[in-house]
Amino acid sequence: MVPSEMGKGYGAEAVQLMVDYLFLSKNIVRIQAITNVRNKASQRVLEKAGFKIEGTIRKLLLVRGVWTDYYLHSILREEWKEPRILTKTA
């Protein structure tokens, strides 16, 4: 992590690239991700890529001795609609 590069949109661009790639190249209907409920930055990155929070997974992981809740995020193919970064080539 390089503090001077934080907040410049690289994470959002990387997630969007992966979403475009997966929906363009694979026959899948959904992509999902989890974030720690306290990790607002990662939640914003997923939201920018079109992910929606489906719910809370309670006490999913033990983090530094504390059971921690996570959000389950997903994007469906029909919500994605078209690539934002990649394009399909024939």
Image (tube, rainbow, N blue to C red):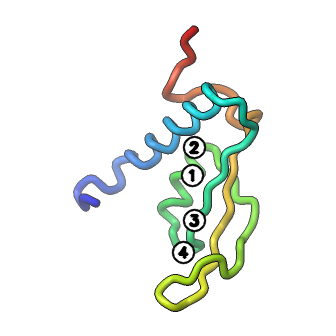
Of mark 4 and mark 1, the one earlier in the sequence is 4
Which sits in the foreground, 48 or 67?
A: 67
Q: Position of residue 5 (x, y in %)?
A: 27, 53
Residue 89, position as x, y percentages in the image: 54, 12
Q: Are marks 1 and 2 in contact (CB under 8 Å)?
A: yes
Q: Amino acid at mark 2?
A: Ala
Counting residues from the start of the chain, the first of labels 1 and 3 encountered is: 3
Q: Is residue 85 above or below residue 9?
A: above
Q: Amino acid at mark 3?
A: Thr
Between 41 and 1, which is closer to the camera in this rendering? Answer: 1
Q: Residue sitting at 56 percent across and 60 percent down? A: 43
Separation (CA) of disc 1 from disc 3: 9 Å
Quarter of the picture containing the N terminus is: bottom left
In this figure, which residue is indicated by the disc labeled 1? 46
Q: What residue lies at 25% left-to-right and 61% top-to-bottom?
A: 3
Do the CB atoms of the residues marked 1 and 3 lie less than 8 Å apart? yes
Determine which residue is flagged by label 4.
Answer: 38
Q: Give the SS element for disc 1.
A: helix
